[in-house]
Image (cartoon, rainbow, N blue to C red):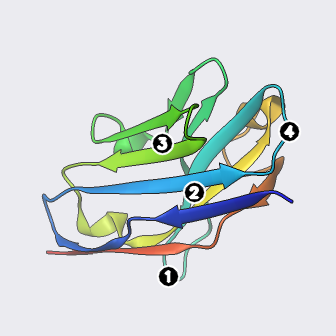
């Protein structure tokens, strides 16, 4: 049974930093795609960042240069380092996992497993 357990959300002031973690277990993909997605109130879900087994990354334009996605294969953990946070980054954040082909898409299509959302609130 695949489990994704996300942690690290919270409230910070604009300009601050947070690091999200997502511990994955129970999967058997040889090559996979993992990513972070977010959904702000009243808005559609959007991709934030994805990373595949080769370490190739992709970022949503508004977070480029501020967010860094990484993975620790030994710990089966996905991270999202978020710096220079802005009020518009306020959202529920979700980690997800799928086969490597899922990284072709940036809207979550193909992601088979999702963690519970964690709230990130940025105050101005």
Q: Residue furthest front?
A: 74
State the separation of the CA atoms marked 2 and 4: 22 Å
Q: Residue furthest bottom?
A: 42
Residue visible at 57% across and 73% down in the picture: 117
CB within 8 Å, label 2 to label 4: no
Residue visible at 71% across and 36% down in the picture: 33
State the separation of the CA atoms marked 2 and 3: 10 Å
Q: Which of the pair 100/106 is nearer the observer?
A: 100
Residue that label 4 marks: 28
Residue that label 2 marks: 37
Classify residue 22 by image quadrant: bottom right
Q: Which mark is residue 60?
A: 3
Is disc 1 surrounded by few (<14), some (14 to 19) or many (20+) residues within 10 Å?
A: few
Residue visible at 42% across and 40% down in the picture: 61
Q: Where 58 sits versus 23, above or below?
A: above
- Image quadrant containing the C terminus: bottom left
């Amino acid at each position: 049974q695949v489990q994704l357990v996300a942690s690290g959300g919270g409230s910070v002031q604009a300009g601050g930093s947070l690091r999200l973690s997502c511990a994955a277990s129970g999967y058997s993909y040889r090559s996979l795609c993992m990513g972070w997605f977010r959904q702000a109130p009243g808005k559609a879900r959007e991709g934030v960042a994805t990373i595949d087994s080769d370490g190739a990354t992709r970022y949503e334009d508004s977070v480029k240069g501020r967010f860094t996605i990484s993975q620790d294969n030994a710990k089966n953990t996905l991270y999202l380092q978020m710096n220079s946070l802005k009020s518009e980054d306020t959202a529920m954040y979700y980690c997800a996992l799928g086969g490597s082909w899922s990284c072709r898409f940036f809207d979550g299509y193909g992601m088979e497993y999702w963690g519970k959302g964690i709230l990130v609130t940025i105050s101005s």
